[in-house]
Amino acid sequence: MSDHRLSSVELDSSLPAPNVEIESDRQRAMADLIGSNTFEPEGAERGPYALKMSSQDGRLVLDITGPDFARTHGLSMSSLNKVIRDYIEICDSYYEALRGTSASKIEAVDMGRRGLHNDGADLLRSRLNGKVTLDHETARRLFTLVTALYRR
């Protein structure tokens, strides 16, 4: 069995302390990601893999290690910046709506949030094409973590 999956994920330890909602999203994304994912780095024969994510000089840096495999990918964040900013803005609106808005407004904001989340996941998968093969759900969870890096 090839076992092309992530067994651990670590975010840059220099990130500022997030608010409660953001920390909850980070923790849920990491737990869900470790629980179920498809992650196959190009040229890797077998996993599982450890992933360390950071942001350096406007680049998303992915340090991937596994049995007999180690590679670092640096991706420009410029193509992701707009969808990340929009996603952060709508998440903030969603958290605010949860504090005292009607159910219909919460549902509308949540639909927009999920749509942007899917857009971000699709863009991330596209940027990783030829480097790492991901399924959609893995890309969604990784996008949540990329957003956490952006919130520095």
Image (cartoon, rainbow, N blue to C red):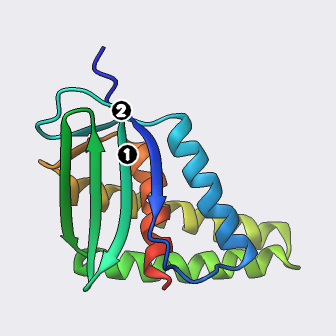
For image coordinates 37% across by 51% down, the residue present is 51
What residue is shown with label 1? Answer: 50
Figure check: 9 above or below 94: above
Mark 1 to mark 2 CA distance (whole Å): 7 Å
Helix, strand or loop at mark 1: strand
> Residue 119 at what x, y percent from top left?
38, 62
For image coordinates 56% across by 67% down, the residue present is 113
What mark, if any, has residue 48 been given in the picture?
A: 2
Residue at the far top: name it.
1
Q: Is residue 6 left or right of residue 40?
A: right
Q: Is residue 13 left or right of residue 103?
A: left
For image coordinates 27% across by 67% down, the residue present is 61
What mark, if any, has residue 121 been given in the picture?
A: none
- Are there few (<14), some (14-19), or many (20+) residues within 10 Å of tag 2? some
For image coordinates 17% across by 27% down, the residue present is 45
Tell me the kind of residue under disc 1: Ala
Figure check: 115 above or below 57: above
Residue at the far front: name it.
68
Figure check: 100 above or below 106: below
- Disc 1 and disc 2 in contact, CB within 8 angstroms: yes
Q: In which quarter of the image is the N terminus?
A: top left
